Image: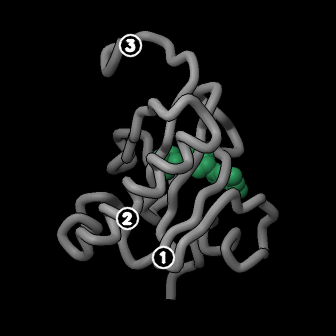
Amino acid sequence: MTEPSVFTRILRGEIPAEILSETENVFVIRDIAPQAPLHLLVIPKTAEYRDVTELAAGDPALLAEMVAVAKDAAAEHGSGDFRLVFNTGSGAGQTVFHVHAHVLGGDLAEGSLGG
Ligand code: 5GP
């Protein structure tokens, strides 16, 4: 068995974090190191999928549920407009290999991906 991910440990209550909302399959927390005025993480409760490519292939309905939850969370905690980011692979900045979506909102800096 591999070590449980930080997100599994949060879900178990072993690492403190406020769960902002949840469904049967997905939960939402604030990122501990926000990169935008609004920075939430939408995380499947299962740790089965390491990244979004595995999730899309293995359970596209769960990926769609993550997008729907991201939309609702961005509306509840921000303006409703948001950027959805899945870092995929360590070379792209992924550090936790339990798939999760970054929901970024607020006054986002202009950069190569937006603005
Ligand atoms: P990644 O780099 O894998 O795309 O994203 C992992 C994210 O998880 C990072 O933005 C990091 O700040 C966040 N993170 C890591 N550990 C914790 C934690 O214990 N609590 C919370 N709320 N976020 C965490």
**Label 1 – label 3 distance at C-alpha:** 33 Å
**Camera-side residue of 40 and 70:** 70
Q: What residue is drawn where x is 48% and y is 44%?
A: 102
Q: What residue is drawn where x is 60% and y is 37%?
A: 39
**Camera-side residue of 98 and 64:** 64
Q: Is mark 2 within 8 Å of ligand 1?
A: no
Tell whether label 3 touches label 2 (CB within 8 Å). Answer: no
Which of pointers 2 and 3 lies earlier in the amino acid sequence? Answer: 2
Rendering coords of residue 24 (x, y %): 52, 79
Q: Which mark is residue 65?
A: 2
Q: Is 84 rendered above or below residue 66?
A: above
Q: Quadrant of residue 29?
A: bottom right
Which of pointers 1 and 3 lies earlier in the amino acid sequence? Answer: 1
Q: Which residue is mark 3?
A: 111
**Marker count (numbered):** 3
Q: Is 85 rendered above or below residue 112?
A: below
Of the residues tagged 1 and 3, which is closer to the observer? Answer: 1
Q: Which residue is mark 1?
A: 25
The residue positioned farthest toward the bottom in the image shown: 1
Rendering coords of residue 87 (x, y %): 38, 45
**Camera-side residue of 86 and 71:** 71
Q: What residue is drawn where x is 54% and y is 40%?
A: 75
Q: Is mark 3 within 8 Å of ligand 1?
A: no
- Going by the numbered disc 2, the residue's amino acid type is Glu
Which SS class for mark 1? loop
Which of pointers 2 and 1 lies earlier in the amino acid sequence? Answer: 1
Which quadrant would the C terminus be assigned to in this image?
Answer: top left
**Label 2 – label 1 distance at C-alpha:** 8 Å
**Camera-side residue of 8 and 114:** 114
Tell whether label 1 touches label 2 (CB within 8 Å). Answer: yes
